[in-house]
Image: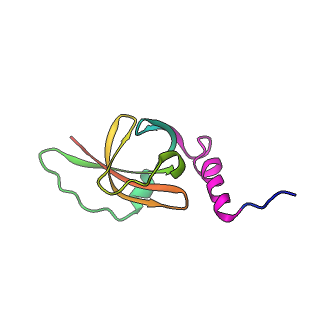
Amino acid sequence: MHKKMTFKEVLRNDAKTVFLNPLEFGGEHTVNGKKMVVIIDGNELTGREKRIKSHMDGIYKKQTLIYVNAIDFGPLPGIGKPVVIDGSTFIVTDSINEGGIYSLHLEANKN
C-alpha cells in the first residue's frame, strides 16, 4: 500500500513537475551562479501596483518579477539583497514564499 502524500508534499512536487517545468512555463537560467528553472513574468508585474520611479539623467529602473523553486534557490532573500540572473545584477524589492515557490520582485538601474 502506498502512503498518501500530504498537501504540502503535493505542492512541492507540483512546483517542479508542473509550474516550474521548462516544457510548460519556466526556462533555465543561471541565478547567483547556479543553473535553475525560473519563470520571468512581465505580465504579472504589469498587473501589480507599481511605484512611480523618477527618471534622472537618463537612468531608469528596470523591474522584473521571477518565480523560482525555494529548494533550488536557497534561503528567501530579503529586501535590498542582490540577485544575479544570467550575469545581470538586480536588487530585491519584494520577496514572498508562495508555498515553496519564491516570488521575487527585482529592480536594476539601466541607462
Instruction: Residue at 55%, 61% (x, y): give it.
Output: 99
- The magenta span reads 6-28
> Does the magenta-highlighted stretch encompass residue 10?
yes
Q: From the viewer's side, name the closer residue of 103 and 47.
A: 103
Residue 16 drawn at (x, y percent): 61, 48
Position of the C terminus, as image quadrant, is top left
Residue 24 drawn at (x, y percent): 61, 45
Is 81 located above or below residue 87 in the figure?
Answer: below
Q: On the rendered structure, is 110 left or right of 13?
A: left
Question: How are the colours assigned in the image?
Answer: rainbow
Instruction: Residue at 64%, 54% (x, y): give it.
Output: 14
Q: On the rendered structure, is 64 left or right of 22?
A: left
Is 99 located above or below residue 13 in the figure?
Answer: below
Residue 73 drawn at (x, y percent): 48, 46
Q: How many numbered discs, if any?
A: 0
Q: From the viewer's side, name the closer residue of 81 and 105.
A: 81
Q: From the viewer's side, name the closer residue of 55 and 15.
A: 15
Which of the 4 image quadrants contains residue 100? Answer: bottom right
Q: Name the residue furthest right.
A: 1
Q: On the rendered structure, is 49 left or right of 109?
A: right
Position of the N terminus, as image quadrant, is bottom right
> Does the magenta-highlighted stretch encompass residue 17?
yes
Instruction: Residue at 52%, 55% (x, y): give it.
Output: 101
Residue 87 drawn at (x, y percent): 36, 34
